[in-house]
Image: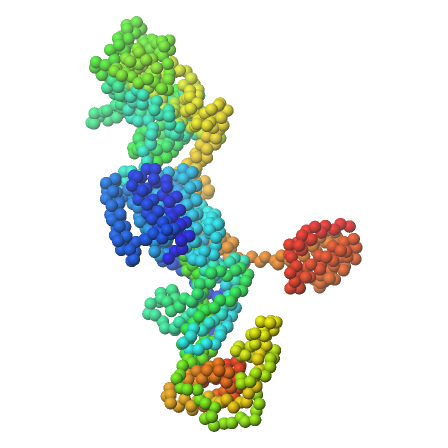
Amino acid sequence: MPSDTSLIWLILSLNLAALPHFSYQPLWVALLFLSMMSWRSLAIWQHWPLPGRQHRTLSLVQWVVAAGAGLLMLDSYGNFIGRDAGTALLIVMVGLKVVEIRNHRDYYISCFLGYFLVVTNFLYSQSIPIAALMLVIIILMTSCLISLNDIKQVLSKMAQLKLASKMLLQAIPLMLILFVLFPRIAGPLWGLPQDAHTAQTGISNSMSLGKISELIQSDAVAFRVKFDQTMPAGHELYWRGPVLWNTDGTTWRELTLPSHSEPRPPIISTTGQPSIYTVTLEPHNEHWLFALDVPTVFPTSFGASLAYGGELLSRKPIKQRTQYQLSSNTRFSMNPDTDHYLNEALILPKGFHPRTRALAEEWRQKAKSPEDIIDMALNHFNQQPFYYTLTPPALTGDTIDGFLFESGKGFCEHYAASFTVLMRAAGIPTRVVTGYQGGEINPVDGYLVVRQRDAHAWTEVWLQDRGWVRIDPTAAVSQDRIELGMSELLPNALRAPLFFSQSEQLIDIWQQLRNNWDAVNNAWNRSILAYGPELQKSFLSKLGMINPNWQSMAITLFAAFSLILLITSAVLLYPRREPDPVVATYQQFCQRFVKLGLVARYAHEGPIDFARRMTHALPHYQTDIGHITAQYISLRYDQSVSSIAEFKHSVKHFKPNK
Amino acid sequence: MNAISQLYRRFNTLRGRRVFILPTRFGVLYGGFLLLILLAAINYSNSLGHILCFLLASMGQLAIHYTYRNMAKIELLGAYSEPCFLGQAIPFYCRFDNPSRHDCLHLHVASKQSNERSWNPFKNVTGFQYQPHQTVDVLTGQQTTAHCITVPSTHRGQQTIGQIRLSTRFPFGLFDTWTYFTPACAALVYPNPIGHLPLPSSTNDGQSHHGIQRKGVDDFSGLQPYRDGDPMHAIAWKAMARDDVLRTKQFSSSLSGQFVLSWHATASLTDTESRLSQLCRWVLDSESHGLAYGLVLPNMTIEVDRGNAHQQRCLTALALYD
């Protein structure tokens, strides 16, 4: 039977390991787990009965609870596999197991289940704080194992924790070697359940007025970009996402092609120097890969292809942090001669936006060329009372008419949508492009960080011989949004959390802290979390391994493993001889005379003879030498109780000079 | 062939004691859990899952070293025992020396119970025939401590301690490391002191020791300073309470009450062991009554005397009789 102390610590560690799960598991999982833990704790403190031979009814209760948990699980998840259901099952199992710990075997199993709980936490979040918490839990869990084997609790809990931490630190070298060299296999080994990845916020494949402005509340990173050489100017940083063509008057959607037609990628011609950059995209569970406008060179590794709107799409939804290198030109022309889908860019739903259509008709009659109409529209936005606001008023009825002729207050999607309607009504093919605009350079590591709040919507018009030309109507209203970036426009309350939003200095401090933290996170993501089969190959090549395949990795791993084993056994098992402190101190004392140029103690010379010779050479120190020698003799040859500390003290303060 | 075995023996001496280590069933279970964690990490391409698996594997590897270190350096300097009666447990005092700087915790001491071999080779490895005796909680670094092992007595006469198995699972219980010692130590087992025959009286012993005046139990004749071997019941406790000096009360008596415990007096018992047991009972009874007695065995005779030394001499003769 494990001791009460070790049980209490086990309960504590398991609670801590299960705690992060409670935020998304159904309430009954948490309640069941906590009540089982309380039952066991009360059994320790208040001697509550536990299920077992003496209390068969309680065993029955436990079975009923287990069966009930199974039914609830079926009700919540429909099965027992998958990430969420599996975790719930594990938590329930741990809870029930702790109640029935009767012997060492049960305790070991609970401990090992605790280690497994740690890994399930990583399936939900691999952030630095979670990793730190899990490290604490591993130490606690290991100290529980020590406590179990320390039957009489000879070691204090502090000593057990210290031993566990020491072992953890000593385990790091081998862990690193395994981490770097263990041949990585690209997962999944079997089909991943549907819920394998947490749903992410981000740009969606449709746009309605007021939808993008929800994203400005989010400080989350959308992607990070590292430019190889120079970065284009801030107002050129348009990160193209889904291109929207179809509208029903309120919502804009992607083009739905007839199933038999083949998608035709656009024809791109570029001028000038391309920018080469690497994007690290956070998972968003959608297909698009954000690129600086239209990429000319893109990887084919994950089935990336250009869609007809010039957006880069991957074959599979992005469910993990993904890195890809691209090359883009900010000066380009897309489909200058014709576009297969031009007609789609002219359709407006019948019977909507009468006032907008009337205005567009008026402009078309006045204008000589499509460019004139565009200028008129932009001037209209610029000179009429239009405001760029992060909190646009809710619109009812015909939202485009309502925005253009009544409220005049809108966010980027209001301007993009109404501009597109105006252009289409005036006979110019126009489409809405959503994505991100701008981003912030983190001065700590030089990465451009694009956050969800940088989400943006703009338009493209098709002009004969020029192809699709980007027009950003938001720029006509608020030049700052494009020139300075989103973060400058945000109110203080959105730029920094509560305490820091009080003054400009505090916001600066906050942003600096955030930059540092973000750089750390970026490094963590790039070097640790992204370490998979591909990164392993490139890293090992950089280290000098020629053609790293699993065979060569296994051989190197074996060699490194043996080396580490040798070193650990040498460090841990080599008998280190510690000299007798008394002798060591006396040798220090003798060394003091050598420094003065006197002849060192002969091998045959006893302490008394040595003292006599030294007193002869340094008569001033007769008392000191005599005193120390007497102390030494008494400590060394006498069973008397002279204090070593006193002897050390007198030697320390003995500083002879000639 | 002889040369090779000599070489092998020499190699063994140089190498030192053999220390064995194997994972316990919990160690195997731990490995299984690590495999599960690795599978989960691979399936979900989870980097921190990989790290956790490797960290735990690395800690498991360290556990081998820690468990080994917790015992490998310990030496059994020697063992001594106290005589006991058949049926009692023999206390063997083993002096363990821990020359390393670390404290060694939770060692199990067991001794070999029988030379029987099991058909199952694993049983010999896991030490089924070693009966656990004691858990040594701590062997402080650079210290020698004596620990008592009790072994049930099996037969009269010399009983050796046999093979000692020292094992430990500390700190994790994932590995079990053990080693064997065979200290040269034998305990003397006296016969079991049972028997219902009455104590032979002094009159029918057939021999006389008239005229010898010796100190006895009959009449108090004074106090003398205590000497080793004086019986406990003769110590003058009251006098000691006064001035903290141990004295022995002296009595004068004639040896009229003396008698000889003879092998032949137990003729009514057929079995050798029962006769020895009866004699043993008599020796103890006579000594506790403060009587002087002699012992006659078919192969030896011990003169009449009394006192601890005499009693031990008699009991040893009974123990070693064959």
Q: Is residue B253 above or below residue A575?
A: below
Q: Position of residue A81 (x, y in %)?
A: 27, 43
Q: Nearer the viewer, residue A161 or A381?
A: A161
**Residue A617, quarter of the rendered image:** bottom right
Q: Position of residue A21 (x, y in %)?
A: 34, 40
Q: Residue at x 37, y 57 (%)?
A: A1
Q: Can see residue A570? A: yes
Q: Residue at x 39, y 21 (%)?
A: A330
Q: Position of residue B33 (x, y in %)?
A: 35, 50
Q: Is residue B210 left or right of residue A294?
A: right
Q: How is the image coloured?
A: rainbow
Q: Residue at x 52, y 65 (%)?
A: B145
Q: Nearer the viewer, residue A14 or A333?
A: A14
Q: Residue at x 39, y 73 (%)?
A: B115
Q: Is residue A341 above or below residue A12?
A: above
Label tally: 0
Q: Nearer the viewer, residue A395 or B259?
A: B259
Q: Is residue B206 left or right of residue A122?
A: right
Q: Is residue A401 above or below residue A495?
A: above
Q: Position of residue A418 (x, y in %)?
A: 30, 15
Q: Nearer the viewer, residue A356 or B165?
A: B165
